Image: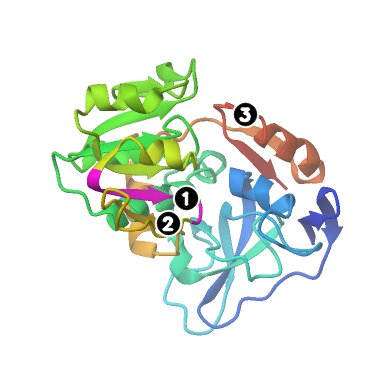
Amino acid sequence: MRAVVRGERGPVLVDVAAPEPGPGQVRIRTVAAAVNPVDVATARGLFGELAGAGLGWDVAGTVDAVGPGVDGPAVGERVVGFRDRLLPALGSHAELVVLDAAAVAPAPDLDPVRAATFPLNASTAWQGLDALGLAPGDSLLVTGAAGAVGRHAATLAVRRGLRVVAAVRPGAGHRVDTPYVETADGWPDAVRALAPGGVDGAFDAAGLGATALDAVRSAGRYLSVLPVLPLPPAFRGVTTRAVAAYGDRTVLTELVALAAAGVLDVPEPERFPLADATSAYARAAEPGRGTPVVLVP
């Protein structure tokens, strides 16, 4: 089968043996697989991957084989899922994908090409909000709120009763539905104008770091999609942590239902053939791009 792996200068298409599902795993015949910012970073080796590492996290398709001990989904079901670690030799940018069954959920009512764009990003948003642990009525800054993870974080936060302040690139305010600030010079001051004293928490989906922290109140909470170091107690008592999404069928099932109901924004993506992964990755790397990118076999 064909798969996309990391080459010396980016993604390359190779022929490899079809993977077989092991215990607790399912194999999916790919209909579409998203190209996310994390895929671009992986292809560039920013996480230290060796050449030949499989690329791709999200996938939508049909289960075509299951391993021992799998209680669902079944062969023939339309599903979405994502790999939640870098260890597998092959990623989702392939004609066949093997995933842990826990990281896969049925999605019979969704357009699979659109559905391929949200499993990893929306799971990151959901699990990040869980980790922040804010209460209804608390204020939350979401950076990158018009982007891949941030737009889902903002939507889900509003549903949880949080008062969201979105931070977006200049000119992207039309893509959010909450009060927002543009990330120009001094933008944390604009956040504090909307949330006097600073926000109770920040979901830093854009990885802005210190500037996003500056908008958080004393003893507030900060979470990033990038690795972070604990802050010294002298830093206003703000607690910091990072989020790394993990496969959770219960969460994925909830997200599928929200997407089917039109609550989650699942726009029509730009499609590229698997054989033209280079162009797909280049498009996905463009700053401020508002449309998701998917590969189709």
Question: Picture coordinates of residue 295 (x, y %)?
Answer: 68, 43
Rendered location of residue 139, percent (x, y): 21, 37
Mark 1 or mark 2: whose residue is earlier in sequence: 1
* Amino acid bearing label 3: Pro
Q: Label 3 crowding class (10 Å Cα cut-off): few <14, some 14-19, many 20+?
A: few
**Furthest residue in direction front, as rendered:** 234
Residue 197 at what x, y percent from top left? 20, 33
Q: Which residue position holds label 1? A: 225
Which three-letter amino acid code belongs to the residue tagged 1?
Val
Question: In the image, which residues are magenta?
Answer: 218-227
Measured Cα–Cα span from mark 3 to mark 2: 23 Å
**Disc 2 marks which residue?**
242
* 291, above or below 205, in the image: above
Mark on residue 287?
A: 3
Circle nearer the N terminus (3, 2)? 2
Q: Label 1: how many residues lie within 10 Å, few (<14), some (14-19) or many (20+)?
A: many
Above or below: residue 12 compared with residue 167:
below
Badges 1 and 2: C-beta atoms under 8 Å apart?
Answer: yes
Q: Quadrant of residue 281?
A: top right
Question: Label 1, label 3: how many angstroms apart (C-alpha)?
Answer: 17 Å
